[in-house]
Amino acid sequence: MKFTVGWLKEHLDTTASLDEISVALTALGLEVESITDRAENLSDFTVGEIVTADPHPDADKLQVCTVNTGADDGELVQVVCGAPNARAGLKGVFAGVGVYVPGSDMTLRKVKIRGVESTGMMCSAAELELSDDHDGIIELSDDAVLGAPAAEALGLTDTVIEIAITPNRGDCLGVYGIARDLAAAGLGSLKPMMPATVKGTVKDIIGITIDFPDDASNACPHFVGRVIRGVKNGESPDWLKEKLIAVGLRPISVLVDITNYFTMDRGRPLHVFDQDTIAGNLTVRLSKKGEKLAALDGVTYDVEDGACVIADDDGVLSLGGIMGGISTGCTETTTNVVLEAASFDPIRTAMTGRRLGIESDARYRFERGVDPASTLPGIEAATQLILDLCGGEAGDVVEAGKSADTSSTLVFAASEVHRRGGIELPETRISEILSALGFDAKKATGGLQITIPSWRPDVTCSADLVEEVLRIEGYDTIPAVALPKLGTLSRSLETPTQRRSGFSRRALAARGMNEAVTYSFIAEDHAKLFGGGSAELKLQNPISSELTDMRPSILPALLAAVGRNADRGFGDIGLFEVGPSYANATPEGQALIAGGVRAGQTGPRHWARQPRAVDAFDARADAEAILAECGVNIAALQVVAIAPDWYHPGRSGTLQMGPKNILATFGELHPGVLAAMDIAGPVAGFEVMLNAIPESRSKSGKARGRLDLSSLQAVKRDFAFLTSTDVSAQDVLRAVRSADKALISGARIFDVYTGEGVPEGSQSLAVEVTLQPVKATLTDADIDAVSKKIVAAVAKATGATLRG
């Protein structure tokens, strides 16, 4: 909603500054979105006078003018001008070299036009984007001061304010409603709106009928119209054009401009028909299948069934509350008109406008609620203005239906303001605030009897009245009060699964992966790639033809996201998600999964260390990071080289605790799966079954994240074991750790070798073992003793020997 400060002051008697007004508007809930100083936009344009205007020597339609710009030295400027009204003595708007002209989208420079030098230009209204008039240059009054800012001479010094309107505040879609709120907030007093009453002086009337089925009787409960004969339609006076231009509306003709003026000024949309183009009388009804309307926006619409329309004997003339038709639009030859004001159902108006894709100022107001009591006052005020500006004689008002009775009363206790809003206000202050907003407040048993005005249908209960009081009194007056402590939590209320979700996110984010949130349903062909696609997991009402099945795995949606990123040039990426997957339609078939994928290279190119393609070991490390964060002893896990079919065979595996409890699957994705999803490999992924992680058996123990550091120096020793190639490195590490659990704090494989010096069918596994003393520094004898235990444990478990 846009308005100028000057327009506001026509309804609000105030001395408040622009800053005070803007702050008050936002505090009232009418948030200021922009403030535009129109004079600043025209600061480079000044008043100039054409001293001489001679024909151009080489162009019949051009004149060579000398212009007095009001310069201190009295120097005249030569301008080549093609405007038909350019003449000596005319004062207009001058733009010099270097000035940007918005209507022409150009910056002026000194040029030669057909051989004659031109320095600057005299501007038309179109070139300043003040109107569409480009037939001639602007003509200013004779008393305009040479060299003065053009904005002052044009009367364009008024500042424009644009505010955001919430859907419940249709009453503030008119300048008068905004002024009423500001007056209630103490920024001045609301000027009384003088009601107009026009007595009919001609007997000519128009027949109006409302014809709706019972189930659609609210489509247009009230419709009034009147004939005005002998009008002269033409250009609007400057004051009216300037108002409309300031708020972004294009002046069309005085009749149309008057209806637009009342739309913006009072939030009361009106419409004017050319009476001589109406066949018979008017009927307000629902549209019929096959009916069309050639609308004023130049588009022909298939109206279809159910729209509220105004029709004559030949068909649809207008869409009620949205837009009129071109066949009955007013033109320069219009002399007899029918002026209309009505109330239309907000829901039906919104549905029709949305279906046809029509945005209009009338629709915007009717779908938010136009005061139903404003139909008769609106048509009377508009009639008076038409008679003042266009002449003519008016007939009597013809009324069909009746204005909806929106009056309602509430008994409101003053204590509600403190109970709901937290501030103590006397009943007299509450009554003062509500009365200033147009509510009728009277003393009654139990508090105040409040009559709600017709323009506030959003106020329906005492809580709404509390909100009105608070926004006028000021939300900043509400004291800050700490919430009462209702009790003490003796323990966390999070379930183990909820805690694991947080642990998983933290672990993967720390490893440089990005969290994604995807739908729990995927395409059928993708579901089948991951063991899904069964009938019981199909959606009965999918939101898209590509999202038909509940996902059997968390990986398909992540892979699709990888593909979309790759298409946009982001091929090296790591994504994860914590969410459900569905094996079947039972509650037991739903599992909480922490899954992720890595694609492309392990990092950017670097001079010191080149990146490599992601592989199964990256996915395993991600899965183990989650399990470790969730309290699982990674050293106790079994790694089995078996994984679901969507993983690459031989480059995948599972992490499990015992033969049956699978905690995670990991590996490179199967090339066939990647090809089916149109993704270039390699891609490695993992899935951790958070529900399968066993709960800790100890009820007490060291706190999560606590470090037990020893003050004694750790010792590292390397061992090279010669084993059969069918011996798992994991078995060797497990045997090493079991040799002395109190002293051995870590063990890892750092080299695998087969080749010269190693028998056929054997391999050399080099293990780094960390010995961490706790009670005393290790002696050589202690180290030798534990080394023997390690060699013996590995030999017993795997048959390996220490390599010489």
Image (spheres, rainbow, N blue to C red):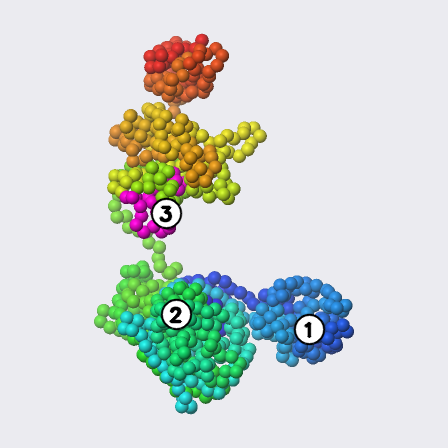
Instruction: Report whether 95 appears left or right of 501.
Output: right
**Within-10-Å neighbours for mark 3: few <14, some 14–19, many 20+:** many
The tally of labels here is 3
Residue at which label 3 appears: 547
Residue at which label 1 appears: 82
Near-viewer residue (697 or 181): 697
Query: Residue visible at 45% across and 79% down?
Result: 273
Position of residue 567 relative to residue 202, above or below, is: above
- Dot 3 and dot 2 residues touching (CB under 8 Å): no
Query: Going from the N terminus, do you reach mark 1 or mark 3 first?
Result: 1
Near-viewer residue (765 or 426): 765
Task: State the SS at label 1.
Answer: loop
- Regarding residue 3, the answer to whether it shows in the image is no
Residue 497 falls in which quadrant of the image? top left
Task: State the SS at label 3.
Answer: loop
- Dot 2 and dot 1 residues touching (CB under 8 Å): no
Give the position of the C terminus as an image quadrant.
Answer: top left
- Regarding residue 271, the answer to whether it shows in the image is yes
Residue at which label 2 appears: 290
